[in-house]
């Protein structure tokens, strides 16, 4: 099991309450031991030193555990807790050396090497406090906090000086080194207390303040204890097991509890004050510290007056300074309150303007909502209708009293459309980030079914939806009638194409029958060409009535069918000629397809009849493709070539005349390439018909 896992187990099984109970038990054991050994000074002294040393080590362990836990709050926080741990370890070493000097060497440990380790505790502890990361606050907030801190420190200073330091100095007749050491402890403690209060007031966020508030209490107790010890030591009244030892014991026990508070994420919870001070919840607890300091100083002043204390004048002067601090703090607060009041007035004025604007907007929107000319409802998060206009009342047959909060929008959807409607409609769904339009059947109060057009729209910053319903029953009826009419016309048009195709095939058959009685080869050839032309047109009409599109055909597929039919008609030896078709799937209008089909038929029949005489072998290639808006048809062969003495644009040949005429009909351009056999190229753009 790794160290982090062990630490998590300790954290889960431990609590701040358990730590507090253990601290009290440790204190009771110490108190009981001192009572039992009170009549045996040597054993009592040994027991006291051992218990204090053990306590320092336990506190160091607590802070070390807090250091490990602080890893989640950042590297800087972890380093700060580590420095605090090191400072307590120095105190533990000082305590052990102190005990050795007293018990083993039987000497006075004051101003010895033990004091050096004790004193190292203060700068290290201060460094640890300063390393903690700071939260951002305004200069005004920091200024107020320093007033509060100043009042606390000044109040404690007055109490300590009046009752401990000044009396001890008056009666002290020893060396200055011992006095300096004693004062150094006290002054260093004040520095620590100031740094901790600054950390609590200005730098640490509220949710992390509990451990540092406990540390501040422990340092305050140690400062008071060091003051009492200085008084006792300088007066020669210090004895082991006295109130001073208890003060150190309590101070370090509380310091150990600060580590426990860090480990267990203890919070500063003063909510119990709200029961007795109702306005407490509106304020932070830190000003109470300053208030406690002022109150304590006032009590001390009353005590000093009643006892005729010789330091009453210093105390009175100090209280006067404290009063000045309090008044200055109040001046800052009054200035701040004036600014807050001014801002509050501005905010109230702004809110009034916004409220009036909202009232006008609400009135305008209600007017628009009521007079849109369409049935409109607002649907809440429970799918209930929360607002309707008059148009919806007329559409549904219900009154507003019967609808609002009593009817769901689904109550009006026809049963067979309900499942589809619920799939579309989902509050908070991403699909309703924009307007959604749907057709449904609507059932009114009388049970009459109407066709409605629904528009669902999310209302921003809410869980409600605006639904607009348009009665499209008449339009739906008209659309259905129009659709039936279009289907009827479509069937009629298909029938026309079918009949045209049949008529052209009849003409082709008649020409075929007639050609059986013709002996003249030229006349027979004319009949075959006419028959082929009729077939090419019939093929287009066949493609049209078989297609869903009655206006356009796939011309690439048409080329393949026409080329194969021509090949079987004109080529007697299929093995002699290779037919290559490189065509794309291109849709053409019938007005372009028929003349282009006739052109293709003429070009193919010419190549098959004249390019390869006497059984000569070769290839015929058809290319058809589209690039941007330009169409290109190329029919080429590698046969004997087109005669050089014939101008294909000015000739008596009916086929070439037909090709040129039809090319002009589709606004195309035709060119001839004689370099490698014969290659006709037709380029055109399809016109809008």
Image (cartoon, rainbow, N blue to C red):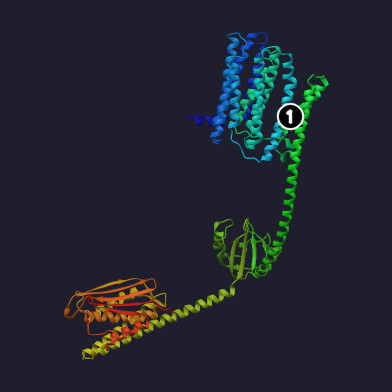
Residue 573: image quadrant is: bottom left
Mark 1 Cα-neighbour bin, 10 Å: few <14, some 14–19, many ≥20? many
Residue 625: image quadrant is: bottom left
The reply to whether residue 617 is in sight is yes
Which residue is situated farthest in the front direction here?
Answer: 176
Residue located 59% across and 63% down the image: 456
Question: Taking 476 as reference, is 548 left or right?
Answer: left
- 382, above or below 183, in the image: below
Q: Looking at this view, is 421 or 640 the one in front?
A: 640
Question: Taking 647 as reference, is 424 left or right?
Answer: right
Residue 452 percent location from the top left of the image? 59, 69
**Number of numbered discs:** 1
The reply to whether residue 243 is in sight is no
- 68, above or below 647, in the image: above
Q: Disc 1 marks which residue?
A: 293
Residue 220 percent location from the top left of the image? 68, 25
Q: Looking at this view, is 549 or 440 the one in front?
A: 549
Residue located 70% across and 28% down the image: 153
Residue 122: image quadrant is: top right
Q: Looking at this view, is 31 or 390 the one in front?
A: 31
Residue located 39% across and 75% down the image: 547
- 163, above or below 500, in the image: above
Judged from the image, the secondary structure of the residue bearing numbered disc 1 is helix
- 63, above or below 586, in the image: above
Q: Quadrant of the C terminus?
A: bottom left
Residue 460 percent location from the top left of the image? 62, 58
Residue 42 percent location from the top left of the image? 63, 8
């Amino acid at each position: 099991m790794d160290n982090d896992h062990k630490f998590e187990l300790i954290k889960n099984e431990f609590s701040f309450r358990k730590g507090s109970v253990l601290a009290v038990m440790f204190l009771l054991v110490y108190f009981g031991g001192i009572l039992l050994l009170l009549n045996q000074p040597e054993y009592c002294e040994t027991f006291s030193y051992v218990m204090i040393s053990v306590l320092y080590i336990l506190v160091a362990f607590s802070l070390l555990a807090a250091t490990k836990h602080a890893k989640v709050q950042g590297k800087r926080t972890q380093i700060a807790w580590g420095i605090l741990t090191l400072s307590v370890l120095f105190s533990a070493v000082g305590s052990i050396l102190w005990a050795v000097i007293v018990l083993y060497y039987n000497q006075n440990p004051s101003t010895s090497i033990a004091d050096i380790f004790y004193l190292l505790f203060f700068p290290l502890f201060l460094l640890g406090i300063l390393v903690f990361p700071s939260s951002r606050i305004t200069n005004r907030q920091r200024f107020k906090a320093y007033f509060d801190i100043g009042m606390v420190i000044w109040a404690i200073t007055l109490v300590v000086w009046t009752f401990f330091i000044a009396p001890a100095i008056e009666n002290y007749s020893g060396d200055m080194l011992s006095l300096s050491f004693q004062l150094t402890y006290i002054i260093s403690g004040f520095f620590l207390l100031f740094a901790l209060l600054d950390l609590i007031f200005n730098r640490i966020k509220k949710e992390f303040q509990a451990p540092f508030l406990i540390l501040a209490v422990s340092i305050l107790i140690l400062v008071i204890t060091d003051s009492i010890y200085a008084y006792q030591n300088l007066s020669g009244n210090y004895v082991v097991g006295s109130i001073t030892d208890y003060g150190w014991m309590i101070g370090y026990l509380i310091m150990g509890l600060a580590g426990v508070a860090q480990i267990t994420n203890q919070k500063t919870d003063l909510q119990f004050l709200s029961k007795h001070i109702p306005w407490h919840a509106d304020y932070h607890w830190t000003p109470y510290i300053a208030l406690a300091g002022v109150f304590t100083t006032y009590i001390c002043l009353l005590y000093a007056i009643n006892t005729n204390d010789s330091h009453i004048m210093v105390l009175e002067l100090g209280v006067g300074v404290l009063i000045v601090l309090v008044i200055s703090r109040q001046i800052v607060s009054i200035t701040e309150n004036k600014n807050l009041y001014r801002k509050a007035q501005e905010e109230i004025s702004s809110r009034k303007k916004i409220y009036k604007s909202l009232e006008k907007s609400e009135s305008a929107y209600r007017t628009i909502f009521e007079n849109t000319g369409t049935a409109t409802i607002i649907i809440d998060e429970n799918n209930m209708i929360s607002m309707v206009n008059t148009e919806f009342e007329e559409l549904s047959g219900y009154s507003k009293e019967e609808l609002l909060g009593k009817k769901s929008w689904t109550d009006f959807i026809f049963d067979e459309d309900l499942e589809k409607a619920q799939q579309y409609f989902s509050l908070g769904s991403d699909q309703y980030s924009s307007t959604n339009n749907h057709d449904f059947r609507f059932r009114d109060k009388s049970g009459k079914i109407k066709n409605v057009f629904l528009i669902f729209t999310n209302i921003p910053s809410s869980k409600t939806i605006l639904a607009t319903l348009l009665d499209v029953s008449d339009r739906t009826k008209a659309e259905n009638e129009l659709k039936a009419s279009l289907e009827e016309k479509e069937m009629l048009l298909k029938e026309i194409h079918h009949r045209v195709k049949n008529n052209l095939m009849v003409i082709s058959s008649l020409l075929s029958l007639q050609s059986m009685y013709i002996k003249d080869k030229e006349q027979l050839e004319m009949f075959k060409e006419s028959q082929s032309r009729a077939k090419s047109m019939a093929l287009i009409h066949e493609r049209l009535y078989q297609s869903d599109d009655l206006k356009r055909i796939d011309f690439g597929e048409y080329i393949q069918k026409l080329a194969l039919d021509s090949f079987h008609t004109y080529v007697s030896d299929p093995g002699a000629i290779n037919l290559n078709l490189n065509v794309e799937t291109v849709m053409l209008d019938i007005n372009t397809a028929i003349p282009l089909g006739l052109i293709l038929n003429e070009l193919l029949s010419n190549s098959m009849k004249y390019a390869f005489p006497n059984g000569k072998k070769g290839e015929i290639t058809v290319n058809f493709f589209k690039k941007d808006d330009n169409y290109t048809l190329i029919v080429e062969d590698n046969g004997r070539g087109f005669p050089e003495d014939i101008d294909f644009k000015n000739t008596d040949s009916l086929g070439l005349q037909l090709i040129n005429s039809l090319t002009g009909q589709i606004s195309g351009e035709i060119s001839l390439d004689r370099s490698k056999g014969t290659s006709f190229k037709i380029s055109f753009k399809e016109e809008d018909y």
